[in-house]
Amino acid sequence: MVGYHVFRNLRLLAATLRDIARHGRPRLPAGAERLASTALYANQAFAWGRRALGLQFHVEVTARRLDHWLVGHAAEIAATPGVTVAGLRADTARWGPPLAEAGRRALARWLDRVEAG
């Protein structure tokens, strides 16, 4: 899955947002709690116990870092139906700034949860 996708059931942020995702169909470990899903994939983020966080998307991505990825993965992007570098750049211009902030908030919230025990 390459591109921006709407996340549902994102309990880590308690909101719906978009993020860059390019991973497949992960299975949850036994006892894990689903934290996020998309229309295509049910298991985009999960908690396993109080201190393990599994993410199948790039919460840390910034517009600048993504542009480096687009150059480095141009052949893979070109081979993905319905996805173009130009389209991803346009989506990044639209979604990049709010995603960077949402990613920082999500990770800070998670670390607060870990620290609280």
Image (cartoon, rainbow, N blue to C red):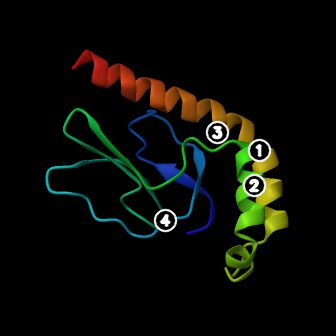
Residue 100, image quadrant = top right
Residue type of the residue flagged with mark 1: Arg
Which residue is the site of mark 2? 68
Using residue 109 as the reference point, say whether residue 47 is left or right of it. left
Q: Residue furthest top?
A: 116
Which residue is the site of mark 3? 99
Real-space Cα separation, disc 3 to disc 1, in angstroms: 12 Å
Which residue is the site of mark 1? 64
Real-space Cα separation, disc 3 to disc 4, in angstroms: 18 Å
Q: Position of residue 90 (x, y in %)?
A: 83, 55
- Name the mark nearer the viewer: 4 or 2: 2
Real-space Cα separation, disc 2 to disc 3, in angstroms: 17 Å
Q: Residues within 10 Å of mark 1 (few under 14, many from 20)?
A: few
Q: Residue furthest left?
A: 31
Which residue is the site of mark 4? 23
User: What's the residue at 75%, 72% (across, down)?
Assistant: 74
Residue type of the residue flagged with mark 2: His
Q: Residues within 10 Å of mark 2 (few under 14, many from 20)?
A: few
